[in-house]
Amino acid sequence: MNAVSALITDEEPGYRSLRLKVLRPVYSRETVREGYPACFARKIINSSQQVYEVFHDLRFEAKEIFLALHLDSKNRILCMDRVSVGSLNASIVHPREIFKSALLSSSAAIVLTHNHPSGDATPSREDLELTTRLRECGELLGIRVLDHVIIGDGCYVSFADRGLL
């Protein structure tokens, strides 16, 4: 076996899995950026109404979808991360997944959003607890959680507007 074939093959145990673990987050982030509409690139987010205008089509989704907008220090959109696709009335979201991609994109802040397929945008107890936990994690990491917007059928609820952040 020569040096070139040793580099190409997976004869060294664990080498390939380590390489994929390092490359996957960067690849996923770039894939999200490419799929994000160009008209929103570098758009400044200043209000919950703007978040609703960007994501109001989530109301048509049959499953709960949880997204995070990554913003720079001037609240311009850097990228969007689809954190989770759940079931009819739940989505599993872990702070590690949200902040991993936020750290990789060098975000200064994030805005969270998800839909309620039922059409009722009222935050559940789980929504309230998750948002509190994410805000606390963001404080530790130096990434501000500016808002969490829940999209319903023709309506939305903003945690920031309601003083819940």
Image: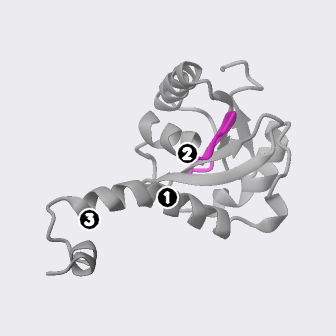
**Residue beneath label 3, please?**
16
Local packing at callout 3 (Cα closer than 10 Å; few below 14, some 14-19, many 20+) is few
From the viewer's side, name the closer residue of 156 and 96. Answer: 96
From the viewer's side, name the closer residue of 156 and 4. Answer: 4
The type of residue carrying mark 2 is Leu
Determine the secondary structure under disc 2: helix
| Nearest to N terminus: mark 1 or mark 3 | 3
**Residue beneath label 2, please?**
104
The type of residue carrying mark 1 is Lys
Percent across and percent down for residue 158 are: 72, 33
Question: The magenta stretch spans which residues?
Answer: 105-120
Left or right relative to 61: residue 88: left
Q: Is residue 94 visible?
A: no
In this rendering, the answer to whether 110 lies above or below 7 is: above
Q: In what quadrant of the picture does the N terminus appear?
A: bottom left
Left or right relative to 23: residue 1: left
Local packing at callout 1 (Cα closer than 10 Å; few below 14, some 14-19, many 20+) is some
Do the numbered discs 1 and 3 sit on residues whose CB atoms are within 8 Å? no
Residue at figure coordinates x 52%, y 37% from the top left = 99
Q: In what quadrant of the picture does the C terminus appear?
A: top right
| Nearest to N terminus: mark 2 or mark 1 | 1
* Residue 17 position by quadrant: bottom left
| Nearest to N terminus: mark 2 or mark 3 | 3
Between the residue at mark 1 and the residue at mark 3, the CA separation in whole angstroms equals 34 Å
